[in-house]
Each structure stands twice: as structure tokens, then as C-alpha cells.
Amino acid sequence: MTTPAPAQLSFDELGTPLRDTTFVVFDLETTGGSAAEDAVTEIGAVKVRGGRVLGTFSTLVDPERGIPPQVVALTGITQFMVTGAPRLSAVLPAFLEFAAGAVLVAHNSGFDVGFLKAACERHGYHWPRPTVVCTVKLARRVLSRDEAPSCRLSALAELFRVGTVPDHRALNDAQATVEVLHHLLERVGSVGVHSLEELVAYLPEVTPAQRRKRELAAHLPSSPGVYLFRGPNEEVLYVGTASDLRRRVRQYFTAAEGRRRLREMVALAVRVDGVVCAHSLEAEVRELRLLTAHKPAYNRRSKNAGGWWWLTLTDEPFPRLSLVRTPRSGAIGPFRSRRLAEAAQNALLEAVPLRACSQRIPARNPSGTPCALYELGRCKAPCAGRQSVAEYSPAVVSLRALVAGDDTTPLRTMAAHLETLSGTHRFEDAATHRDRLAGLVRALDRGQRLAGLAALPELVAARPDGSGGWEFAVVRHGRLASAGVARRGTRPMPVVDALVASAETVQPDDGPLHGAPPEETSVVLRWLDRPGTRLVHCDRPWTSPAHAAGAWRSWVERAEAGRDQYRITGH
């Protein structure tokens, strides 16, 4: 039986030559093998292009936990060495910037990339979904079992006689992996693999059926937008965004897509639809709306649509904090999970002397029994008539002022308690208290900023498109109402006028965000916050309260960096 010759690639499919591809070869040392439970102790990376080293990145990382003896024996990284090293929250953004736009390479990449993804999720960074090349998989594809019985890094380093001996230290292992990668790329060049796209398609995970389906992307334009994979019954299987629809969708039919679930999705897909968007903001917003409308089976995010939590004061003589799904005016949030909302609730109960119990207490003649919190001095027992409505109300007023951004006294109270704990050498309690306060500040700051944007009836903003033109967004009550572009040489204001005239009408609702979906408002706010954005029009001033939680951002940054955690000045 004759194997059919593969279809010849068109000129625009040839891709990026390997000699012009920037690779960031990296290695992590960790306290164990679980990305969910263990922590990074060291990061080492080398940026290369065309065989030339462009830069290196190397740092120890404080794992904020003990390093097991067997790991110390393997890596030589001791607890003393990481004491005083920066934490991952400070190192991660620097590494993401170092690796931005490059192809990531690692030996057994699933392990290292798994830790990076978990770290991004834990610290609130977007995972950029770079192309990833695993030198273990590439070696198994290129080398025979006789030539390389083992594909461990040490074995491949010995086989290729590389100059750097791997020793379970991150930078040395990354440098050894660079040399191994170059030897492997020499091998694939002899079989006609000369571009990045050809390299990822050459890896073994791509089945012939998966490769044949690349024709599903043939009709898509090289424009920003949203793509929808559809199944045999026209059901939407998956929704995603792309700056180049055709290129991004083609990646699903190569080894660049290594996720098992999405390979399964590609096998089911019979068509890919594309929705061309003006720019990245419109694409992100349309993706969110399509996820809500279709709830695709293969999008993890669609399973959490609408899963926001809020904290609100109950409507009773002695109000208490309650977790709700539908917010009312003055609610605190939004929170992605119940766990985060409960953490903020606990922090607020430390900051403001509200009752923690859930019983309803009448305004007159309460007949309850004081609980243990009364004995500990953390509640004044309004349930037993030992605190009147008038005596209780200052706590309610204080909380509402904190949420509205009118007063940060509760935060100062928590900070003073933190200093007391530190001064009495109760460092573990101080660290817990510090993290709780930092989490509360972040939650309040985010909620106040989202509410400030959602309160605006109309805002028009512009960003340079990088080619001498402008990207525009019309935002109404936190929702994207219209989007467009004025290319270089086009007068921008007539475009703005047309976008405003054709923008979606938005009727505000109740609640802190006036009915806007929290995730959409967050996406819009991130776009507006990016350097270079200009306000074209705002029908009323976009302001932030003078005593908003944003005034404490520098404190949170110092606390997370492990420097000057407890001293508060200037707020």
C-alpha cells in the first residue's frame, strides 16, 4: 500500500524559520513533584536565537515552606540558601516578561510548564499560551532506542558531549538543554524540518487525521477575532480568541496543541467558524459572551460562568455579612469562588466589630445566650441584649464607609494589630494576619475600581494600534458597547462619532456594577489600564474615592515582596 504524499504547504504556511525563532530554554527546581502542592525554589533560563545567546535569567526563589531533605540532597539547594530570596510573586512577572513572545523549551516540559501555569493562576497572571517544545519528546522522535536508551538530560548531555554538565541546578540544566536542543535541531533539519511550524508538526502527538483537519482553517482570515469549533450537530465545542485567526486555529492541528481534551475536541470538530473583531478587546468580550451563551463542553471557563460571589449586609436591626450570588447596592466583591469570599469575610470581621453569627436578632428584648466569641471579647452579645441597635450601628457605618472608599480606619486597625503581633515576635500569626489584610485590600480595591467604571454612562477610549492608527472602544456602564479602528491616514473623530452613534444601548441595573458581568468589566478595565490608552470622551469625570483601598496598593506590594511588611505610613 502506497502512503499518499503529504499536501504541499502554501507559501503563507511555511512559517517562521528555526534560525529566526527565539527560544527561551528554562528549568525549574522545586520542593516536590506536585504543581498544586509544591513550590519553586529556583528558575534558570537562557534566551537564544540562531545559535546565539541573547540573555540569561537566574534566581533562587523563596518557596515559603520547608525543602524536604531528599530534595536538598538532589539539588543542593538548602533552606539557608533560599532565605531572603525573592518570592515567586515577585519573580514570576519578571520571568514572563523575559520569555514574552518566545517559544518555551524545557526537558520534560509538562513538569515545568505545569508549575508555571499553576503559579500564574495562583498569582493572578494570564498564561500567554506560548508554543512549547519538549526536548524529551523531540529526542524520542529523533533518536533511536539503540542510540539513546535513556532520554534523561544527563544521558543526552553525555551522548552529545555538551559543554555544560547538568547538575539539578536550574541555570546549568537550562544551558545543557540549549546545547541538546541545538543538536536535535540539526538532526531534524536533515529530514526537511526548517520552520517552527514544521517542528511542532513533526512531534509524535499529531495523528494523520489531526493533520488533515488543518483544512478547516483554510477559509479563516489573518485577522483578530473569535473562533468557534463546531461538532457534527452544529453544537459549539470550543471558543477561543486569536490575534490571527488562521494561524491560531492551524495550531490545533499540530503538536503545538498538547492538551488531551482539546485533541479530543479537534477529533470531533467538523467546522470552525470565525468572527472577525476590530481589536483584542472586542475579541475578549465576544469570547466571554459566547461562552455564556453556548457553554461549550471543552471550555473550562464556561463551567464557571455566572459563578460570582458577593458579601452584603443583611437587612435587619443588627446587620451581619452574608454571602450572596446576586448583589445589592453596597455589596463587596465580586469573588470568583466561595472560598475567596469567606476569606474576605473573615478579614472584615477582624477589621470591623460586626457579629459573626447567623441568627436573626430582634431590635427589642432579645433572649439569646452569649457564645464563645463574647467570652473572647470579639462580640458584645447583642443576641442577649448586652448591646443596643444604637451601640451596634457604628460598626455598620464603618463597614459601609470602608466599602464606599470614604474611610480606611478598619484597615489601619488591622495594620496596628499586625505591628503588635510582629513586635511580640508572634511571626506566624503576623504572617497570617498580613496575608489576610493584603487579600482584603486587593478585594476592596478591585471592587471599587470595577464599580467606578460601571458607574459611567459612557466612556470612549483609544489606543495606538502600533501602525500609526487607533483602536477605539465605547464603554457604557462597564460593558463594551462598540469597537472599531481608524487605520493610519484615516481621520479618527468621524470614526468615533460613528461608533458612538451605533453603540449598543445599555440600561443600568441594580448592584455595585449596575448589572454588568464582572468578568467583562474586568477585561475592559485591564484594556483601559494599559500604558498608552487615551480617554477621548467621558460624559462625567471618572474618579476614585480619596480613601479607597487603592491607596494601600504599595503596602500590599511590600508585603508580598517580604519587605517592610508591617510599617504603614502615608495613608
Image (cartoon, rainbow, N blue to C red):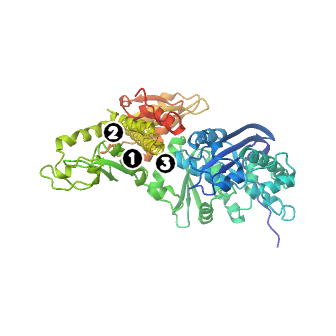
- Tell me whether circle 2 and circle 3 mark residues in contact (CB < 8 Å): no
Task: Specify the quadrant of the image occupied by residue 279.
Answer: top right
Q: Residue 455's spot in the image, x, y percent?
A: 35, 37
Disc 1 residue type?
Answer: Ala
Q: Is residue 300 in view from this perspective?
A: yes
Q: Nearer the viewer, mark 3 or mark 1?
A: 1
The mark tally for this picture is 3
- Residue 26 location (% of width, % of height): 70, 46
In this view, the residue in front, 4 or 306, is 306
Q: Which residue is mark 1?
A: 344
Q: Secondary structure at mark 2?
A: helix
**Residue 375 rendering spot, x and y as whole percentages:** 27, 50
Foreground residue among 132 and 507: 132
Question: Which residue is label 2 attached to?
Answer: 403
Label 1 element class: helix
Q: Is residue 229 above or below residue 542?
A: below
> Which is nearer the N-term, disc 1 or disc 2?
1
- Residue identifier under label 3: 286
Q: Pointer 1 and pointer 2: residues touching (CB < 8 Å)?
A: no
Real-space CA distance between mark 3 and mark 1, rounded to the nearest whole angstrom: 31 Å
Measured in 3D between alpha carbons, the distance from the residue under mark 2 to the one under mark 3, in whole angstroms, is 31 Å
Side (left or right) of 186 relative to 275: right
Q: Is residue 398 left or right of residue 110?
A: left
